[in-house]
């Protein structure tokens, strides 16, 4: 728990600094993804280090000797998209570097800072009647419908590129390239 709290506190401090730098008024949060064997802890939103104590309480209630041993801590990103007034997040499928499809994960009972991949979630195809439409010449900026599929594809490709750099940088068996 000490290791978890130290790392959560460090990441929250970095995110707070960036929020201040960019003038973001929201309260930063991190997502803690914990795997506790048969008692899969799931995903928890953490806005303060004290929130991590809940993980310890949950695991001790189920098995006093157990506790999360493998966790991932990620910066939380608010979900701004909505489908039918429910919080929605785009999911993009890629093969190699090509976007090949996607959908919205929608959860009417969850907030913008919560995990939407939970019981009660629904799925809506990421298909738009004018998905290939580009801004039309002669129209005012912003008058054309946004091509969300394209935007999500760009973000997906950037995320894949960032993940490849991270994997290469953290690979214990990496080869040295000249």
Image (cartoon, rainbow, N blue to C red):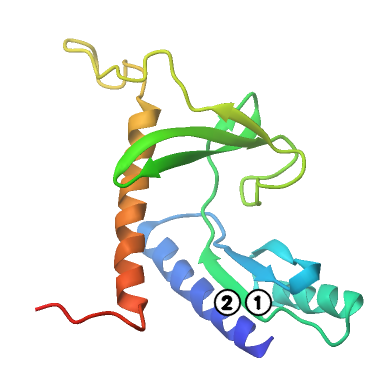
Residue 154 in the image, given as x and y percentages of width and height:
31, 41
* Viewer-closest of 44 and 93: 93
* Viewer-closest of 51 and 129: 129
Which quadrant of the view contains residue 9? bottom right
The quarter of the image holding the C terminus is bottom left
Q: Residue furthest left?
A: 178
Q: Is residue 141 left or right of residue 166?
A: left
**Which label's residue is closer to the chain start, 2 or 1?**
2
Q: Is residue 69 above or below residue 157?
A: below
Residue drawn at the location 36% of the way across and 53% of the way down: 159
Residue bearing mark 2? 8
Labelled pair 2, 1 in contact (Cβ < 8 Å): yes
Residue bearing mark 1? 49
Residue 156 in the image, given as x and y percentages of width and height:
37, 45
Q: Is residue 170 left or right of residue 83?
A: left
Q: Determine crowd level at label 2: few under 14, some 14-19, many 20+ residues with C-alpha closer than 10 A.
A: many
Q: Is residue 12 left or right of residue 20?
A: right
Q: Secondary structure at mark 2?
A: helix
Which quadrant of the view contains residue 147? top left
Q: Measure the C-alpha gap from mark 2 to mark 1.
A: 6 Å
């Amino acid at each position: 728990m000490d290791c978890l709290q130290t790392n959560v506190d460090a990441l929250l401090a970095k995110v707070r600094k960036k929020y201040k730098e960019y003038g973001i008024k929201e309260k930063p949060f991190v997502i803690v993804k914990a795997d506790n064997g048969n008692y899969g802890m799931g995903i928890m939103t953490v806005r303060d280090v004290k929130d991590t104590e809940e993980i310890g309480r949950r695991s001790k209630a189920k098995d006093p000797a157990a506790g999360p041993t493998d966790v991932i801590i990620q910066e939380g990103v608010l979900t701004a998209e909505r489908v039918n007034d429910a919080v929605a997040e785009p999911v993009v499928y890629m093969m190699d570097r090509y976007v090949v499809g996607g959908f919205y994960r929608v959860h009417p009972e969850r907030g913008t800072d919560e995990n939407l991949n939970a019981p009660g979630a629904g799925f809506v195809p990421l298909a738009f009647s004018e998905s290939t439409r580009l801004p039309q010449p002669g129209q005012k900026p912003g008058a054309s419908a946004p091509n969300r599929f394209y935007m999500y594809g760009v973000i997906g490709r950037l995320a894949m590129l960032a993940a490849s750099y991270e994997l290469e940088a953290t690979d214990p068996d990496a080869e040295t390239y000249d």
